[in-house]
Amino acid sequence: MPVTKLPPNFLWGFATASFQIEGYTDAGGRGPSIWDGFSRLPGKTLDGKNGDVSCGSYKLWETDIALLKQYGVNTYRFSLSWSRIIPLGGRNDPVNPEGIAFYSAFIDSLLENNIVPFVTLYHWDLPQALHDRYGGWLNKDEIVKDYTNYAKVCFEAFGDRVKHWLTVNEPWCVAILGYGRGVFAPGRSSDRARSTEGDSSTEPWIVGRNVILAHAHGAKLYREKYKPTQRGQIGITLNGDWEMPYDGTPESTCPQRTRSPKSLHIDALSPRHRSSTNRPRLRHRHVALPPTRCFLPTILMLFSDVLAGWYADPIYLGHYPASMERILGARLPPFTPEEWKIVKGSSDFYGMNTYTTNLARAGGDDEFQGFVDYTFTRADGTQLGKQAHCAWLQDYPEGFRSLLNYLWKRYKLPIYVTENGFAVMNESSKSREEALKDTDRVNYYRGVTAAMQAAISEDGVDVRSYLAWSLLDNFEWADGYTTRFGVTYIDYDTLERFPKESAAFVKQWFTERIQAPSP
Ligand code: GCO
């Protein structure tokens, strides 16, 4: 059978983030970020390790570019470290010329190798100084101004060459994991479920509102001042996984998507790092519930509205999800009419980070999960898919296709898949030789690429990129180095890089399919 082709401008490659790969946290005039101190605190990472060395990409960046070249990619997604560019972070603080020079040389080298830079402005490493000075993301007026200034510095320094900007990576994680569960920097915790005393958490919701505003102001500035000449695109990227009701009914028996998407919209707090210890620590991703589901209990519908739409609905549709308003009441921070004007329509595309599918059922007492429990075990005791090393991830590619369809129908914007990947069970305890044979990761990529292909060619979904997470094994936040997501194995003693079998699979899959540009 002939292979269906992807257009020549389809972007494919790998993704990383500054704090997860750069290391050299004291070099080049960089200021500390909230992750520096947090990851050094005892007990904050699973293996007690921090980001000081990581993959050493700050010095080994040419090796990374050689790898990208070897893998044949046409795009690389990476993030800029705010505190390398403005060490103290603020709008009145000095810009660090060494930081600018570092990323400038990196971008030049990517372009010389015909690799499109896809740049994230904020992937969780807030300058520590801003947290100390005014509470970081909790302080609306200050953080929005400082973020917008930082974005301006980046547009001015790199916008002549960067045409793909992501304002913020996965704001759900920033807010809930950083200010709710306290398992990510800055480690603030208001992790109280539905309390018998009444109100529960407030900080995560405030942070969420402030991140949306920072994103929106950054995008507004770009569109007004830089886009006319630089001609790039700007948007946010959100985490979201597919979710199916726990009732054992196969997806194929569902009727067409005819229900109002609004009533079924889910932005579930698919829970990573749950507070209770005896339950699986599922993923933090928010979730889209299939509008095909016709038999969901009301509680799931309610849940679906609460959290998947927390970011996407304001940004793409101009309102909070109704049930989120209902559940949070006065704790849901409002936007002023002027702010709504800036927020609505502030993303040029839908940036999609996705990893898994979950089965959801009503229950639980956790507000951050919308009072819903997650499982991968079906009612008949079978598993949804292959289990990854992290408890929140199983391989279920059909969910990837459903999610693409759902987002395309609901938000009607081109979709950039900006992250997707798999952590092989116990890869860190394997010998290097064994780890390079990452069959489960190959199978995962085989499944999702086929699912994406079907979504594009059979369902007509407008997908513009596929960026696999990740180029390298790297610092996996609270998991430290115990969880490996890379298509490249890192020997953490020598920092040598070794391609795994999955790198060859992904390379072959895309290079066979991307059409050559017409002469
Ligand atoms: C996230 C981040 C990445 C992670 C990856 C694997 O989604 O958490 O964007 O930094 O490392 O998703 O968990």
Image (spheres, rainbow, N blue to C red):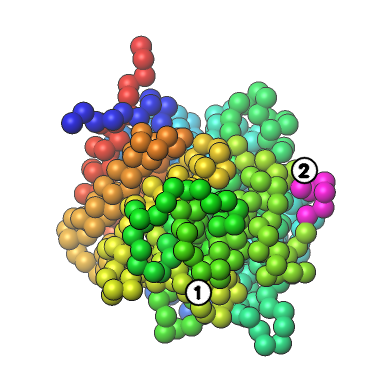
Q: Residue at x 72, y 79 (%)?
A: 199
Magenta region, main secondary structure: helix
Quarter of the image where the N terminus is located: top left
Q: Is the residue under label 2 in contact with that under label 1 (CB below 8 Å)?
A: no
Q: Quadrant of residue 508?
A: top left
The yes-or-no answer for disc 1 within 8 Å of ligand 1 is: no
Q: Quadrant of residue 201?
A: bottom right
Q: Is residue 519 visible?
A: yes
Taking the magenta stretch, the answer to whether it contains residue 339 is yes
- At numbered mark 2, what does the secondary structure look like: helix, strand or loop? helix
Segment tinted magenta in the rendering: 335-341
- At numbered mark 1, what does the secondary structure look like: helix, strand or loop? strand
Q: Residue at x 67, y 88 (%)?
A: 196
Q: Is residue 192 left or right of residue 206?
A: left
Q: Residue at x 42, y 62 (%)?
A: 244
Quarter of the image where the C terminus is located: top left
Looking at the rendered structure, the kind of residue marked 1 is Ala
Q: Nearer the viewer, residue 219 or 330?
A: 330
Q: Crowdedness of circle 1 by 10 Å Cα count: few (<14), some, many (20+)?
A: many
Q: In whole angstroms, how far apart are the C-alphas of marks 1 and 2?
A: 35 Å
Q: Is residue 336 left or right of residue 31?
A: right
Taking the magenta stretch, the answer to whether it contains residue 417 is no
Q: Nearer the viewer, residue 431 or 11?
A: 11
Residue 204 image position (x, y, % from top left): 66, 67
Q: Which residue is mark 1?
A: 362
Residue 50 image position (x, y, % from top left): 46, 67
Q: Which residue is mark 2?
A: 341
